Every structure is written in structure tokens, then in C-alpha cells.
Amino acid sequence: MNDNVEVLVVGGGQAGLAMSEHLGNAGIGHLVLERDRIAEKWRTGRWDSLVANGPAWHDRFPTMEIEGADPDGFASKDQMAHYFETFAKQIEAPIRTGVEVLSVERRTDGPGFRVETSDGTIDAQFVVAATGPFQNPSIPPILPSDTGIHQLHSSDYHNPGQLPDGNVLVVGAGSSGVQIADELRRSGRQVYLSVGPHDRPPRSYRDRDFCWWLGVLGLWDMETPPHGAEHVTIAVSGAGGGRTVDFRALAQSGITLVGRTASYQDGVLRFASDLADNIRGGDANMLALMDAADAYIERNRLDLPPEPEARALLPDPECITHPLSELDLADAGITTVLWATGFTTDYSWLKVDALDEQGRPRHRRGVSSEPGVYFLGLPWLSRRGSSFIWGVWHDARFIADQIGIQRSYALYGTS
Ligand SMILES: Cc1cc2nc3c(=O)[nH]c(=O)nc-3n(C[C@H](O)[C@H](O)[C@H](O)COP(=O)(O)OP(=O)(O)OC[C@H]3O[C@@H](n4cnc5c(N)ncnc54)[C@H](O)[C@@H]3O)c2cc1C
């Protein structure tokens, strides 16, 4: 392959496809390169039983519905992969799969960028990095690898059967951690769940899904938080038809909650004494959203049924009132520690002046500090919704517009 394209889009997940749709609509020539298959993360980077976190009417691109999915239900991961594959066909995305981008450098012999791929060299005027917010699994360096305990990241978890016999500690209580812990407990294992600070919106309130509430309250469109602001994970799930994540109910079902996993020595893991605070922080977040929803209903005179029972909290279980400060892994029969601790980005292939000293993208709304390079799909790229399916579509439209503006200046006087 030896090519010349106007815009090279790196990554064929939802971000790359949304970008392709908007570039196509603007009549801007482009090529999408995907190292695996379209929507690979939805195919192989998620556990078997995963369903979308938002209902099918919401977690999709505005220009195509999810075929065969109940709009108020939660599409399976396979339905999502099929959705993106079908979408690529519908928009006739110019995409080459099985081609990895190895490096992007500014050309020294002309404008634009030289792109080395696993299938040859491409010159591009513009490059969009749409490789996703979740490239490398992140595991905090707490438990050494030579303890004999099986360790894996949530992105490598598929189902309970793949784990060695024995009990499990799941670290991280965002959407992934709570769903996996629940699934492992249902499979008959004794499960410990290490709970850090989190938000836990009600799955639905007064006959509306929380996705709707975040929308009408303008919270999906909340702008990028100030640099360094703490990222708080969201515990929300469409599993089992969609229920509010309730840590006290998880404890009642048999899961032992512990605080943040802090350190390890001589077979013993120690936990921070923050469990009760983290649980109360999650409660406060849930109740605040209900308050805002009530005020919205009142202000707009909406006829939505009151739901006072949604505010009721179960009593604190023993594991919250008398939390474990440490756990001897052998005594507790723990054979697996599963880290649901998130991801980091990897732009090692992007050899231009668009990254800070820590390798983080330097950009404003996806427009990078290196003219001609754009980022897409990152959390809080422009707003809270930026890394989600519908949010990335809107960011892609903005970036297509920005590329269009620069392109028309570049074309001035050339014809
Ligand atoms: C467990 C989990 C559940 C989620 N559930 C939802 C949900 O229900 N609803 C929702 O809106 N969001 C959800 N998200 C968030 C987000 O929508 C997904 O993470 C989504 O996959 C991100 O899409 P993306 O296109 O930005 O990145 P990805 O899907 O990661 O796509 C990036 C693509 O780039 C390719 N790539 C990377 N490097 C290169 C390279 N050098 N050359 C060529 N190709 C490359 C990769 O192979 C990959 O296919 C979830 C995230 C996780 C982790």
C-alpha cells in the first residue's frame, strides 16, 4: 500500500465510524485504518454477558437505530458489534481492516504527515486519532506477580468458567466491577468487592431512564472538568433488564464489600478505611439526581408518577458497619484478583507535538496542539458524553467541521 489521502482516521471503533460519516457528508476524502476488525472491542474486549449501559433508544448514533433491539432494553455486546458493522456498510465507510498504524510523523518534504502502517506508507493532510479512550488495561502495582494468585484485568474477563476454582476479589466498583462481581457471586463463588469513590445514578426514576435525566438536565453536555479534577467512576448497568446498582443489596446477596485496595504484604491485602464514605458518596449522588429530576418535573409541570420508594436505602450491612481492614488471601480462599481498574491511552505511534510530558493528548475539543492532528473519543473531550456512543458522534461532527475549515484555507488559490 502506498497512498495519499486527505484525512487518515486511525481506529475503526465507534469513534472512527462516526468520523467517517461526518467526513463523508462533508465530501472530504478519507481512509479509516483498523488493526483488527470493525468494533473489535465490542467483539472481544468485553465479557460475554455484557449489555450496553444505556437503553437502545439512547446508546446509538442518531442516524441509525439498533436493529432487533427493544428501544427501552439494553443491547448485547454482539448486537452492538453487529450494529457498528452494519453502520459501516450503510455509510459505505472507506475502511481497511487488519492494518495497523505504526507511526505518524510530520513530513519534511511537504505539507501533512507520513504514516507508516503494517501495509505500507500513506501520506495524509490530516490525521484523526480515533483509537479510543481505553487502549491499555491499567492495573495498580499492588500485588506482585509471583504470589501464586491469578490476576487478570476486566478486559480479559469473559465468564466465571475461565477462572481457577476458589474465591475472588474484584477491585473496582464502577460499571465493570459491580457487574462482574455479581456474575461471579451468582456462579457460586465467594466474592469480595473493593469499592472506591463512585457515582451511582438511579437506573430509572419516575418512569424515565437515567440517560434521559442526564440529557434533559444538561449533564451529558457538562463541559470538560478543570484539569486535574478527580475522575469519579459511574456504577450503572443494564444487566438483568436494568437495575440501580445498590451496594447494600450486593452485600445482602453475599458479596463482602471492602474499602479501596491499598497495599499488600506477606499474603495480606490491606484496605483503606473509606468504605462507608464511598457508599455514602454514591448515595448522595443518587439522591442529588433525584432532587434535580423532581425539580425539573415541577418546573415543567410534567405528569410523571412520584416514586418516593426509590429514595429508601437498605440498612448498612455488617461489612459496612465493621469493615475489613485486611484480608489474608490464603485464609479467605482467594485464588483470583480481578482488576476492574480502568484503562490508559497509548499514543506511542503518534510522533508529533500533540502530547504532554506524560504522553497525554494536548487538545481543545479534540483539536490538538499539532496543526492537522485531531483526537476523538476521549473522556471529557468536549463534554461528559464524549467517550460514549452518542457523544462521540457529536464531537466527530465538530472535528469534521474544523477539518473542513482548514482544508478550504489550504485549497485557496490552488485551482
Ligand atoms: C466494559 C465497557 C462497557 C462500555 N459500555 C458502553 C455502553 O454501554 N454505552 C456507551 O455509550 N459506551 C460504553 N462504553 C464506552 C465506549 O463506548 C467504548 O469503550 C467504545 O468501545 C469506545 O469506542 P472508540 O471507537 O472510541 O474506541 P474502541 O472501540 O477502543 O476503538 C478503537 C479502535 O482502534 C483500533 N486501533 C488502536 N490502535 C490502532 C492503530 N495503531 N492502528 C489501527 N487501529 C488501531 C483498535 O483496534 C480499536 O478497534 C463502554 C466501555 C467499556 C470499557
Image (tube, rainbow, N blue to C red):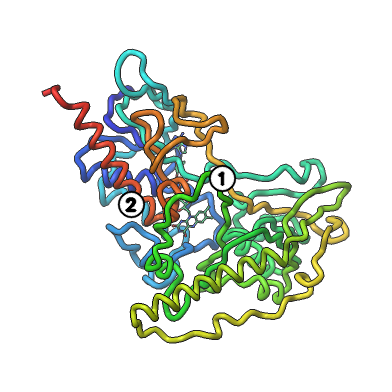
**Depth check, front residue: 362 or 291:** 291
Judged from the image, the secondary structure of the residue bearing numbered disc 1 is loop
How many tags in the picture?
Answer: 2
Specify whether 110 is left or right of 259: left
Three-letter amino acid code at disc 2?
A: His
**Which residue corresponds to the image point at 28% horizontal and 29% vertical from the top-left?**
5
**Front label number (2 vs 1):** 1
Q: Is residue 22 above or below residue 219?
A: above
Amino acid type, residue under disc 1 in the picture: Gly
**Residue drawn where x is 58% and y is 56% of the image:** 232
Residue 241 position in % (x across, y down):
50, 73
Would you place residue 183 above or below residue 372 in this image? below
Q: What's the mark number on residue 46? A: none
| Mark 1 C-beta to ligand 1 under 8 Å | no
Q: Nearer the viewer, residue 320 or 125?
A: 320
Q: Is residue 202 left or right of residue 399?
A: right
Helix, strand or loop at label 2? It is: helix
Mark 1 nearby-residue class (10 Å; few <14, some 14–19, many ≥20): few
Residue 178 screen position, x and y as percent: 62, 63
The residue where tag 2 is placed is: 394
Relative placement, left or right, of 345 versus 399 is right
Q: Which of the image's four quarters has the C terminus?
A: top left
Q: Going by the image, does 166 lie left or right of 360? A: right
- Which residue is more in the foreground, 247 or 57? 247
Q: Residue 293, position in %: x, y?
A: 44, 75
Place residue 54 in its image quadrant: bottom left
What residue did someone put label 1 on? 228
State the CA–CA distance, disc 2 to disc 1.
25 Å
Q: Quadrant of residue 80?
A: bottom left
